[in-house]
Amino acid sequence: MQTTAILWHVSLLAPEGRKALALGMVGLVRIAPVIVFSLLSGVAADALDRRKLMLATQTVMAALAAVLGWLTLEGRTTLMAIYALAAVSSAAGAFDLPARQSLVANLVPREDLPNAISLNTIMMQVASVAGPALGGAVIAWGGVGWVYAINAVSFLFVIGALLMMRIAPVEAGFAQAAGPARGNFTFAAALEGLRFVFRAPLIRSTMLLDFCATFFSSATALLPIFAQDVLHVGAHGYGWLYAAPAVGAVVASAVMVRAVDWIEQRGRWLLASVAVYGAATVGFGLSSFFWVSFVCLALTGIADTISMVFRNLIRQLETPDRLRGRMVGVNMVFFMGGPQLGELEAGLVANAFGPIASVVSGGIGCLIATAWIAAKVPGLRAYRRSAQPALPVEGDREQARAGEPG
């Protein structure tokens, strides 16, 4: 909801003629803290109690949402205030995400991890459907300030869930013993995570694939322009357009909970789904009808969810627990940097050549990048369900087999 509201809010405050650039700047202020803190946050997720770390980050983000809501309802917001609060919230999120994703593997047995990842994807996508749609309705009813206020309250439910969460002592002890020493935020620990990622061809290629796809096909930042100036559907239509990818993602997630267990050619499915993502983005850019645009965006959600499940599964299975937080920290630069920098790129191209040219060229760029990665990394094309995963803790120093097909 808050992401939807921020983009709409910026589009209202931006001066005429610079709206696309102002929307693109949202991506820049969000990704800068991720780049700065990605390595440190990964080490923190491996060295600290992951549940307690999430409690701290969720509390900070709740306070920031409350401040943003108060400023907006009082009529004191400016573009710089929105950018500043979005940047600080992104910094807190940079520490939250490695802890969140790493925690999943400590809550379920290893054999249930594929299903847990799929179920976790459903949880995120259901929220992604309800959030933008409700956000558009709340914007139309009471304005963006109430969206920020509702978001601040929503963090209380996350905090409550974390307080009720109990990890079995043996699992918690295993997780912490496997990572760096408690409080060991050393440069060497961060470099160990970097070395692991860049020496594992499978993990490295999935991150690069994610970055290229979302960098070139990031149409989200331009949705306010399409809703207002191309499709003429207003705030309600904007909310549904923003929610369309998540609608497709929910359907795909429900299927993937079961399908992930029997799909053998995981690498080929991953590459094919990213190609569909790029093609659907081209279709959205060329459409001048609301429902065609909605379907194209829903297809991007379906394709992105399929690729997301396989990307996360490959990375989680190929990463030892002691390095999982640092792997996610490095990955943040790719999977958050892609869409956020992509928003800036989309804004710059749209400002120069128009929104349609920006989206269509981005989709074509996604297709080219996917073909290039598929050609360069044969191990990814050949990756199968029967591939031997990395051991949980031991044998992770070189990880040479991480790039080998099963």
Image: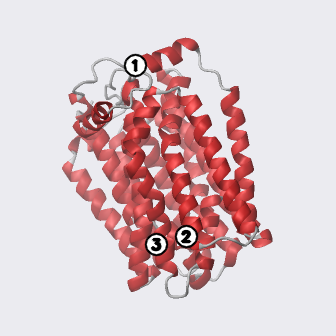
Which is nearer the N-term, disc 2 or disc 1? 2
Which is nearer the N-term, disc 3 or disc 1? 1
Residue 156 image offset from top left, x and y in percent: 72, 42
Left or right, 102 with respect to 363, comes to right
Seen in the picture, residue 374 relative to 166 is either above or below; the reply is below
Residue at the location (43% across, 51% down)? 34
Residue 246 image offset from top left, x and y in percent: 59, 56
- Residue 283: which numbered mark, if any? 3
Give the residue at mark 1. 178
Seen in the picture, residue 175 relative to 3 is either above or below; the reply is above
Q: Nearer the viewer, residue 251 or 152?
A: 152
**C-alpha distance separating marks 2 and 1:** 43 Å
Please tell me how crowded label 2 is: few (under 14), some (14-19), or many (20+) other residues with Cα within 10 Å.
few
Residue at the location (28% across, 64% down)? 368
Identify the amino acid type marked 2: Met
Which is nearer the N-term, disc 3 or disc 2? 2
Residue 55 image offset from top left, x and y in percent: 62, 35
**C-alpha distance separating marks 3 and 2:** 34 Å
Front tag of 3 and 1: 1
Give the residue at mark 2. 80
Q: Which element type, helix, strand or loop, lies under badge 2? A: helix
Identify the amino acid type marked 3: Gly
